[in-house]
Amino acid sequence: MAKHSVQRKRKKRGNGFSFGSAVVLVLCFIGVSFGLYLWQAAFSIGQPTPPYRIVIDAGHGGSDPGARGVVQESEMTAATAEALNAWLERDPNYIPLTTRESYGSTAKPAERAAAANVQDPDLLLSVHGNSAPEGSSAVGFECYPAVPGRAYHQESYYFAKQLAGAMQAAGASLRGRGGIRYIYYQGEAKQLVESSHKEVRVERSFTILEDVNCPAVLAEQCFVTSDTDVAQFGSEDGCKRTARAYYEAICAYFETTPLPEE
């Protein structure tokens, strides 16, 4: 009898331990879950939410025509920006913004950056065209994110990757290291370096990238001096093709589903 009593007592103590362990595990689970919730809430503070405010900066314009070639740069950037804004206007996830009243008005890069900042943007894309000396066969797409060491470098670089990928998918050749490069100004001269150069430098990059308060990329969509490049990405249809690629890159950056092509 004594032996059976001891066994029953041990069994009861065993059941008590299991119940206590379960309570502790439940409390731990609740604590961890609450901690994760607080972490996620803290992480999301300051993160943009839809509709996202997108600044499309059409490079040059007004008294500054930009590069001249098969097409004029300012006309190409205006056509591309207009087509891109049309996509963004139709998509409820986005609010398109501009950096000046009209494509025909003149505004310096610092003025365009200031105009962007007052609109509290989530992202900026500055649209440009490239050029090369007569006789050059240069073609292709390249873009310039905010340089290393700047507040929005990582986000800008990620957006640049989306842009380069979308343009490559549209048929563009990518210049440099995957179509992404950095520009630094040393006095009046500018130095181009590949995106593999991650060192932080004191020299300024493009003003529109340096002065805007959001992730930003300047895109050189094609060479206005190349018949082949312009036919693909600088003509009337080419600007529409480029605008669609830019729109898809913006959607990829914010992880939204692009509207179907018409």
Image (cartoon, helix red, strand yellow):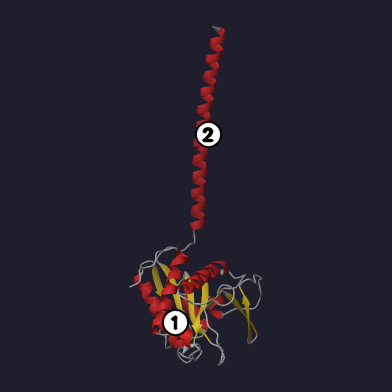
Between 2 and 208, which is closer to the camera in this rendering?
2
Q: Residue furthest left?
A: 262
Measured from the top left, where is residue 23 in percent x and y?
Answer: 50, 32
- What residue type is disc 1 on? Gln
- Which of the two discs, 1 and 2, labels the residue nearer the N terminus? 2
Between 168 and 204, which is closer to the camera in this rendering?
168
What residue is rendered at 56% in x and 80% in y?
207
Q: Residue furthest top?
A: 1
Measured from the top left, where is residue 18 in percent x and y?
Answer: 52, 27
Between 68 and 62, which is closer to the camera in this rendering?
68
Instruction: List the residue tagged with mark 1.
Output: 232
- What residue type is disc 2 on? Val
Between 109 and 260, which is closer to the camera in this rendering?
260
Of badges 1 and 2, the one in the foreground is: 1
Quadrant of the image containing the C terminus: bottom left
Q: Which mark is residue 24?
A: 2
> Eyeballing the image, is 63 above or below 14?
below
- CA–CA distance in space, label 1 to label 2: 65 Å
Quadrant of the image containing the N terminus: top right
> Eyeballing the image, is 261 above or below 14?
below
Measured from the top left, where is residue 112 in percent x and y?
Answer: 49, 81
Q: Residues within 10 Å of mark 2 (few under 14, many from 20)?
A: few
Let me know if residue 36 appears in the view: yes
